[in-house]
Image (tube, rainbow, N blue to C red):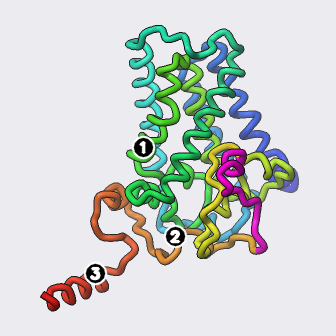
Amino acid sequence: MWFLRFFARYFYVPAMLVGLIGLTVYLMGNGYRYLWLAFVILTAIGLSLSMELVLPYEEDWNRAHDDIGKDVAHGVVYELGNLITLGLLFLISLGLPALNLWPRSLPFAVQFLLALLIADCVMTMIHYLSHRVGWLWKFHSIHHGVSRLYGLNGFVRHPLHQAMDVACGTLPLVVAGLPVPVAAALGTAIAIQLNLQHANVNCAIGPLQKLFSIGPVHRLHHVNWAGVGDVNFGLFLTVWDRVLGTFRPGSDRAPRGADIGIQDCPHFPQSYARQLRIPFERESPCEPRESLAAAREAQIAKG
């Protein structure tokens, strides 16, 4: 058991970032079937869930919060969305003229890192705007309407918001001539990072905390403390937050069991079907129905 705790503490993050993402780049760079990527993603999810049991950051976050069914549904839809996206990207690439804007002559690993940097920048900006533009927040609030952080939270997002991320972060690269295997490796790396970013593992990341948006950096993004959580929007790297002035490496107080979620909305709906409807509802899911009814009656009384 001590060995597993030691591994979770010091080697879980390298196993995800270097091991599984490195394996993804190797598989796609050497022409393996795309089906292997499903194995990589399932391995990442299994590793995260295992390490959460071995060395949890917060014991209470390992307990179901009436959210397992909803989170599994989000995860399945997220991965199906990735498969559909991969197929669409392949079809789009077949119909595009040869723009020759993408440096295909570079080694596969270099192409992957370049694509990751560009996508990370674009997706960080979408994330940043999703906290500031009302209609985008209605979609993104579903990701923040959780009461704990663990690996599957990374896949909790409205499908249309996921589509926006993919369209803005990946489609321009494909139009520029990004090879589909590189796009597939990028999509898999994003899925691994989302799982790692939200995992309930008390890992030691040392100086990596200044470079990667994982561990305490991303936990701080999810806190429900007034005026604190509007920071650390990066998907992979913290560099974009440094440019935006939104990087914060930590806080005097470590987030714990009841510190996660949306301020003033402790009972965000946990039904998957309801979460799909929330962006299109006129009423806030955080307001009690009784208050809404009283407000309507007062408005009618005023005539």
- Looking at the rendered structure, the secondary structure element under dot 3 is helix
Instruction: Give the quadrant of the C terminus.
Output: bottom left
Tell me which numbered mark, 1 or 2, is placed earlier along the sequence. 1
In this picture, is 284 found above or below 191?
below
At x 36% / y 70%, what residue is drawn? 285
Amino acid at dot 3: Leu
Number of other residues with Cα within 10 Å of mark 1, as a class: few under 14, some 14 to 19, many 20 or more: some
CB under 8 Å between discs 2 and 3: no
Amino acid at dot 2: Ile
Overall secondary structure of the magenta section? loop
Estimate the spatial distance between the alpha carbons at disc 2 and disc 3, rounded to whole Å. 19 Å
In this picture, is 272 found above or below 288?
above
Residue 198: horizontal and vertical position, in percent?
A: 63, 54
Please identify the quarter of the rendering in which residue 302 is found.
Answer: bottom left
Q: Which labelled disc corresponds to residue 77?
A: 1
Q: Which residues are magenta?
A: 238-252
- In the rendered image, which residue does mark 2 sit on? 262
Residue 210: horizontal and vertical position, in percent?
A: 80, 51
Estimate the spatial distance between the alpha carbons at disc 1 and disc 2, rounded to whole Å. 23 Å
Amino acid at dot 1: Val
Relative to the observer, which residue lies in front, 115 or 13?
115
Relative to the observer, which residue lies in front, 34 or 88?
88
Relative to the observer, which residue lies in front, 231 or 154?
231
Estimate the spatial distance between the alpha carbons at disc 3 and disc 1, rounded to whole Å. 32 Å
